[in-house]
Image (tube, rainbow, N blue to C red):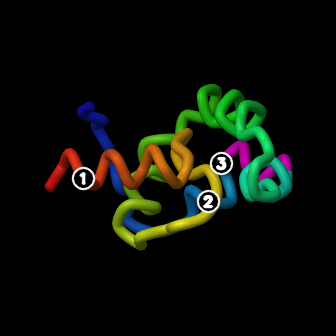
Amino acid sequence: MHIDTITPADDTWQAQALCAQTGPDFFFPEPGSSVREAKRICAMCELRPACLEYALAHDERFGVWGGLSEKERLALRRTAS
């Protein structure tokens, strides 16, 4: 899986992302809960590539970042190695 990413010069993108307008409950659900709604919101966000790159660069281990769950980001890291 190859995902093109664009890194803004700073983290101002975070305040403009759709997740900032919806709150953390969707993106950091209780263990075993669905992340479907978070992924739906991410799919509509134009800042998704920057978010994913941030999560990978900062080794974010919890929540949905850039439209991917923890397990999906781990798999992406493994295939990139």
Would residue 78 be found to the left or right of residue 41 on screen?
left
* Residue type (three-letter) at the residue carrying disc 1: Arg
Q: Secondary structure at mark 1?
A: helix
Badge 3 density bin: few <14, some 14–19, many ≥20, Cα 10 Å:
some
Please tell me whether residue 23 belongs to the stretch shown in magenta.
no
**Which label belongs to residue 17?**
3
The answer for how far apart the CA atoms under marks 2 and 1 are is: 26 Å
Q: Mark 3 and 2 residues: CB-CB less than 8 Å, in contact?
A: yes
**Which label belongs to residue 14?**
2
Image location (x, y in percent) of residue 29: 79, 54
Q: Mark 3 and 1 residues: CB-CB less than 8 Å, in contact?
A: no
Taking the spot 57% from the left edge, 64% from the top edge, the residue there is: 12
Would residue 63 be found to the left or right of residue 59 on screen?
right
The answer for how far apart the CA atoms under marks 3 and 1 are is: 27 Å
Badge 1 density bin: few <14, some 14–19, many ≥20, Cα 10 Å:
few
Q: Is residue 23 above or below residue 18?
A: below
Taking the spot 56% from the left edge, 56% from the top edge, the residue there is: 13
Question: In terms of depth relative to the viewer, which is nearer, 44 or 9?
Answer: 44
Image location (x, y in percent) of residue 65: 56, 51
Span shown in magenta = 17-22
State which quadrant residue 2 falls in: top left
**Reading the chain from its start, which is encountered first: label 2 or label 1?**
2
Taking the spot 56% from the left edge, 47% from the top edge, the residue there is: 69
Taking the spot 60% from the left edge, 28% from the top edge, the residue there is: 43
**Residue behind mark 1:** 78
The answer for how far apart the CA atoms under marks 3 and 2 are is: 5 Å
Q: Secondary structure at mark 3?
A: loop
Q: Mark 2 and 1 residues: CB-CB less than 8 Å, in contact?
A: no
* Residue type (three-letter) at the residue carrying disc 3: Ala
* Residue type (three-letter) at the residue carrying disc 2: Gln
